[in-house]
Image (tube, rainbow, N blue to C red):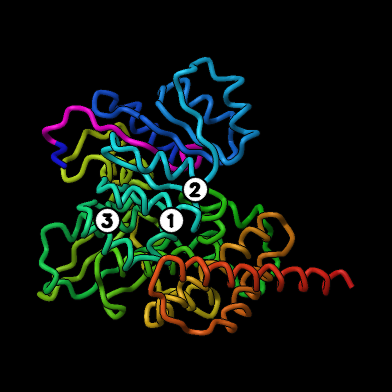
Amino acid sequence: MKFKDSPIKRLSILGSTGSVGRNTLEVIRHHRHQFEVIGLAAGRNVNVLIEQALEFRPQYVSLNSASEADIFRSQNPDPQIQVLVGSSGAEQIASLPENDIVVSAITGIDGLKPTLKAIEMGKRVALANKESMVVAGPFLQQLARQSGAEIIPVDSEHSGIYQCLRKERPEDIKKVVLTASGGPFFRYSPEQMKAVTLEEALHHPRWEMGRKITVDSATMMNKGLELIEARWLFNLAPEQLDVVVHPQSIIHSLVELRDGSLLAQLSPTDMKIPIQYALTAPYRENSFLPPLDLKKIIKFEFYEVDIEKFPLFKLAREALTQDLSFSVFLNGANEEAVAAFLRQEINFYDLVTIVLKIIDQHQPQKVNSLESIFEIDHLARQLTKKFISQWMRGKEK
């Protein structure tokens, strides 16, 4: 796709009412001469989707259920908008032939099938749904090679890597280092972490994100998932990947080259910057955000990840050297445990313990199809739900 030759890029957003979706629309507000929104897929947030549809006038919208779709229709003054329902609705929006770009921002493995549809259509996929690459990275990349699709990362860390690697030869890459803020509990003692609340876990020191990813940041599972994602995004070996804690969150990624050079990508901690680049790459547009003021930066700090305090990061790191079924199983167990924590059925310490217990039940198996991915994911979720139910009953006694 020759973006420079196309005055208007048409795009759809999967997960438009979430954090990445809303930030994407903010970018579009400031570059209306370049983008036309043709599809918005949401979950259950009908009111926000109505507001977005009124402003951006897409041709299609999608919601989780028929009842939510009925609410949308009753309050939407534009009868020209086609209202779709369920996972098939999101997949249909991802498959629109008129799309130039599909922003994939549905949380969790629910985003995998729509992402696949966009890749099958040979579109540019601005990928914010890391779980898709975690559980199906080899399949997504093979499909992209066949269809001619582009997968451009939206996460700030992967965007930084993408930008640093663009002009480098693969044989010159020695190591890729993702930075982590450390989350809200970086300076907590192990004893303090046993007593943290949901409110504390959802209070990230640097980024405003969705609830699931914010909890993953608190356990540092998010950074582990990003390691797995980076492996498949950039075709890297496990020994080429590393993470350092950088509390300032100004350096997003570093790339060490074999001649001793170290490339770094720096920017303010605002998701709109990597989102904008994913929409316009390899070209750049003027930013509407305040620039990074180097004179105000007092220091850069870097620390190793404490794998004893953050055992879920250790598990994800281990996944780099395991078969793909390990990553699928781990992701499914973690999604279910995080959901239970967000419902306040379990506490933070329980969340970590439960995932550690469930991963012990993983049995390695060959992943030779997308169907097998969903089967492994389903098994992990069923085991996790059963364990959580038993765990809760045990606490009630």
Q: Is residue 16 within the magenta segment?
A: yes
Left or right of 198: which side holds 307? left
Density class for disc 1 (Cα within 10 Å; few <14, some 14-19, many ≥20) is many
Q: Which residues are magenta?
A: 4-19
**Side (left or right) of 252 relative to 169:** right
Amino acid type at mark 1: Leu
Tell whether position 288 is magenta.
no
Tell me whether the residue at label 1 lies in contact with that at label 3, contact meaning CB atoms closer than 8 angstroms: no
| Residue receiving disc 1 | 112
Above or below: residue 123 compared with residue 371 = above
Question: Could you say which disc has been placed on residue 160 in the image?
Answer: 3
Going by the numbered disc 3, the residue's amino acid type is Gly
Q: Residue furthest right?
A: 397
Q: Is residue 192 visible?
A: no
- At 62% across and 35% down in the image, what residue appears? 66
Cα distance, mark 2 to mark 3? 18 Å
User: Residue 304 at what x, y percent from top left?
Assistant: 40, 75
Give the residue number, with chain letter if any, for mark 2.
Answer: 209
